[in-house]
Amino acid sequence: MTAYDRPETPRRIESGRNPLVRELRLLERDRRARTRSGLYLAWGLHLAQEALLARAPVRSAWLGPALDRTAEGRRLGEELPGHCRSILRTTTRLLDTIIPGCGDQGILLLVERQRRTADDLIHGGADLLLATHGVQDPGNIGSIVRTAAALGIDGLLVLEGCADPYSSRAVRAAMGAQYRVRIADGSSEDVLASLERAGLQIVTSDVAQGLPPRAIDLRRPTALFVGSEGAGLPPSILDRATQAVRIPMAAGAASLNVHAAATILLYEAARQRQDSGSG
């Protein structure tokens, strides 16, 4: 039981010693706490609006004075009670002690993560999955989630060495796409074995070799793998590939940002599927 499951939550909180505030700070700094509780933080007017549009499972909304300074913020404050379990009023200073800058927006949401396993995604009728390995920057992970939502993939598999896609930095970079994209963690060995059992094509990005994206049939049920900019994907993944893909680059260019590479590959998959009428 978390502090948010206890009855009679006060409607106004101003003390940083309150157990609810302590829990928010723990969730902000500790990935294990987010994973264990199934909760994450999203802050800002746009992310709150997106949460309402997506009918995201919002556990509580923390509102500061800044929210009431605009007509847009006031409208949001009026809509929130019908979309979350509790509304808590607090101060700008206290919000900023949880996430710096949050107080200026006047809105912080505590959101429930949809609990899914890698097998849930792979064996749940997936036709196009993206797997990330060793992507350590939360901004890159968040941007990948945002692109995944825009291009309509069936799910994102987050493998070892990756930043948490549910950190507040990643959620901010994704602009709320976590509400819509199905995301699951997993080890590369388990994920590869599951993909092989399910019969999905495994396509790995490889700067050293591989076919250009247009030369690979991405209309088939496919899992695309991308790795870190420096190390790329490890041999343990590359050796299990059905196909290797290489993005053509100008002479002298060593690599692409991993988000850029993922975008190119997902766009090519979407283009092929649209052209064939299968997407």
Image (cartoon, rainbow, N blue to C red):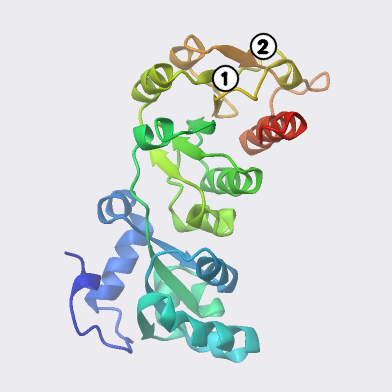
Q: Give the mark, 2 or 1, whose residue is nearer the N terminus.
A: 1
Residue beneath the point at 39% across and 25% down = 191
Report which quarter residue 222 is drawn in. top right
x, y percentage for residue 78?
Answer: 50, 88
Crowding around mark 2 (Cα neighbors within 10 Å: few <14, some 14 to 19, many 20+) is some
Report the residue marked by disc 2: 210
Q: Which residue type does callout 1 highlight?
A: Thr
x, y percentage for residue 35?
Answer: 30, 50
Residue beneath the point at 57% across and 39% down = 153
x, y percentage for residue 176?
Answer: 54, 59
Report which quarter residue 8 is drawn in. bottom left
Compared to 227, does 48 lie above or below? below
Which secondary structure lies at badge 2?
Answer: loop
x, y percentage for residue 100?
Answer: 48, 69
- Mark number, residue 204: 1
Compared to 234, does 84 lie above or below? below
Query: Is disc 2 in contact with disc 1, using a CB cutoff of under 8 Å?
Result: yes
Q: Is residue 217 left or right of residue 127?
A: right
Crowding around mark 1 (Cα neighbors within 10 Å: few <14, some 14 to 19, many 20+) is many
